[in-house]
Amino acid sequence: MTTRSAHADAAGRGDLFDCRCPTRQLLDRIGTKWTSMAVKVLADAAPDEVRFAELRRRMPGVSQKMLSVTLQNLTRDGLVARRVEPTVPPRVHYRLTELGLSLEVPLAALRTWAEDHMAEIDRANAADAALDQPTFP
């Protein structure tokens, strides 16, 4: 049984400009650096799985808690599949679903854009910071 958001149109498409539409929360979740990095690592491994510890090693700076929350969100949204081996301690494996794989293309474009334009953004930030400096006669 599938449910449809009360804020989706007949085709099932959300409306970002409707403040009650869950599309806004979805964009908050998929628009984070940790989501982008996790999707990239999992896409690079596809169709194979990646264990939690390996994901953490390949995502510099991510805490165990933040990676766990990110993966929980991605799993809940149907973008990542989780498999637990009943060992002691349990081995947890992750892989992108087909829906998750479809997210890699737009996230890759966004990552590329950010990397290509970082120097320009840095210059704009530096220029703005210089304007905020007090001037003395």
Image (cartoon, grey):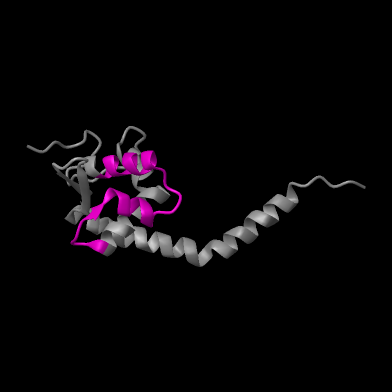
Asked if residue 97 lies left or right of residue 55, the reply is left
Asked which quadrant contains residue 21, the reply is: top left
* Vertical position of residue 56 compared to residue 110: above or below: above
Q: Position of residue 23 (x, y in %)?
A: 31, 41
The quadrant of the picture occupied by the N terminus is: top left
Q: Is residue 100 magenta?
A: no
Residue positioned 13% across, 41% down in the render: 86
Asked which quadrant contains residue 12, the reply is: top left
* Vertical position of residue 21 compared to residue 131: above or below: above
Asked which quadrant contains residue 60, the reply is: bottom left
Judging depth in this view, the residue of 50 and 89 nearest the camera is 89
Judging depth in this view, the residue of 47 and 64 nearest the camera is 64
Q: Is residue 80 visible?
A: no
Judging depth in this view, the residue of 112 and 47 nearest the camera is 47
Q: Position of residue 37 (x, y in %)?
A: 37, 55
Q: How many marks?
A: 0
Residue positioned 27% across, 45% down in the render: 74
Q: Is residue 56 visible?
A: yes
Q: Position of residue 76 (x, y in %)?
A: 22, 40
Judging depth in this view, the residue of 51 and 107 nearest the camera is 51
Residue positioned 74% across, 51% down in the render: 131
Asked if residue 85 lies left or right of residue 113, the reply is left
The residue most toward the left is 1
* Vertical position of residue 94 compared to residue 111: above or below: above
Q: Is residue 62 magenta?
A: yes
Residue positioned 37% across, 54% down in the render: 57
Q: Position of residue 137 (x, y in %)?
A: 93, 47
The residue most toward the bottom is 116
Asked if residue 83 lies left or right of residue 16, the reply is left
Bounds of the magenta segment: 45-74
Magenta stretch: helix, strand or loop mostly: helix
